[in-house]
Image (tube, rainbow, N blue to C red):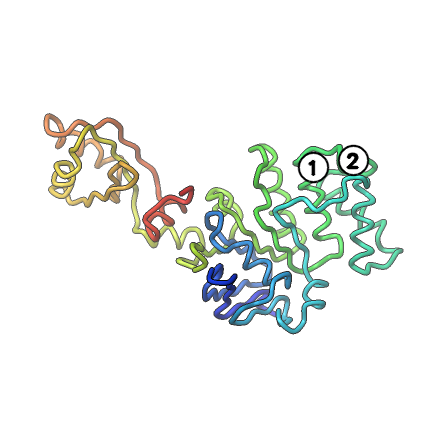
Amino acid sequence: MDAMIETKGLRKEFGDLVAVNDVSITVKKGEVFGFLGPNGAGKSTTINMLITMLPITAGSGSVAGWDVAKDPDRIRASIGVIMQTNSLEPELTTRENLEYYGRLNHMGPADIPDAVCEVLNVVGLTNKADELVKNLSGGMKRRLEIARSFLHRPGLIFMDEPTTGLDPQTKQAIWRYIRHLNKDQGLTIFLTTHYMEEADALCDRLAIIDHGRIIAEGTPAELKDMIGEGDIIDISLDNEEDDRFAAIAKELGMTARSHEGRLRLHTDRGEERIPDLMAACAGKVHIRSIALHEPTLEDVFIHFTGRSMRE
């Protein structure tokens, strides 16, 4: 089976609100596929339909070869899930949480102890096996949720915003565990996030979603190439000088576009063009700041939507 997830025209309505609108994706076996978009874009709603927690309004979907509408029990037995909110039992120990989850997933009683030891070792929580969950740090709880998600050895794990609210060091640790599950354990992972760097670092392919619609799809490199090869120069000017600067840039073969109170230029060899710009503007336009960077996924989102992800 090459496709672990496949949707065609997936749609979800809540009254007059269309939360997911005509989403068609294919997630290949063994890859990390990302859904990148701002809060409210339809990421969690899509996951909830695929894990059979929400009924589909229109369209179709299959997960691990099973039809989302017709085979919910088979799908739930085939997947692991990490949701945004903590669903651990705080008054149970780390080990007891995993044992309880193993029984819920109909694991054989004789198989559970070894499986628990194995997943605790993978996420570095062996020394916390007998600690009450309520006493664990936020990062440890997230690691425990990751361990729980693959305790019953599913082929596919859904992760909904797995690092939201974590500090940078803990976030990096969670990334390492996700890479381990994918590369070393061979698990397919469907990941939602609003962190650009997370999507760039983890995803083999991703879809950018906004207002319930997919606006672009591809590898991180392919998406960046969509906005043109080369570098991006962001310029901040004094007063009302945008038109004058745009005319100067045009004379140098560059097009300036306004974005968030700055002007943005796309050009090859940006580090070589900046001195030309500065020289051409001398005595005509006062540049307050100038910044050069390679295209990012944030730039891709701006290109297709006209605004930043944080908006």
**Label 2 Cα neighbours within 10 Å, binned few <14 / some 14-19 / many ≥20:** some
Lateral position of residue 276 relative to residue 133, left or right: left
Q: x and y percent of residue 194 in the render?
A: 49, 46
Answer yes or no: do the residues labelled 1 and 2 have beta carbons within 8 Å? Answer: yes
Q: x and y percent of residue 123 in the render?
A: 71, 42
Residue farthest to the front, as pictured: 15
Q: Secondary structure at mark 1?
A: helix
* Image label count: 2
Instruction: Specify which label sits upstream in the sequence, 1 or 2.
Output: 2
The three-letter code of the residue at mark 1 reads: Met
Residue at which label 2 appears: 128
Residue 28 versus residue 107: which sits nearer the camera? Answer: 107
**Label 1 Cα neighbours within 10 Å, binned few <14 / some 14-19 / many ≥20:** some
The three-letter code of the residue at mark 2 reads: Lys
Q: Quadrant of residue 174?
A: top right
Residue 261 versus residue 34: which sits nearer the camera? Answer: 261
Q: CA distance from mark 1 to mark 2?
A: 9 Å
Q: x and y percent of residue 107 in the render?
A: 82, 59
Q: Residue at x 61, y 35 (%)?
A: 170
Q: Secondary structure at mark 2?
A: helix
Q: Quadrant of residue 275?
A: top left
Q: Quadrant of the C terminus?
A: top left
Q: x and y percent of residue 155 in the render?
A: 67, 60
Q: Which mark is residue 140?
A: 1
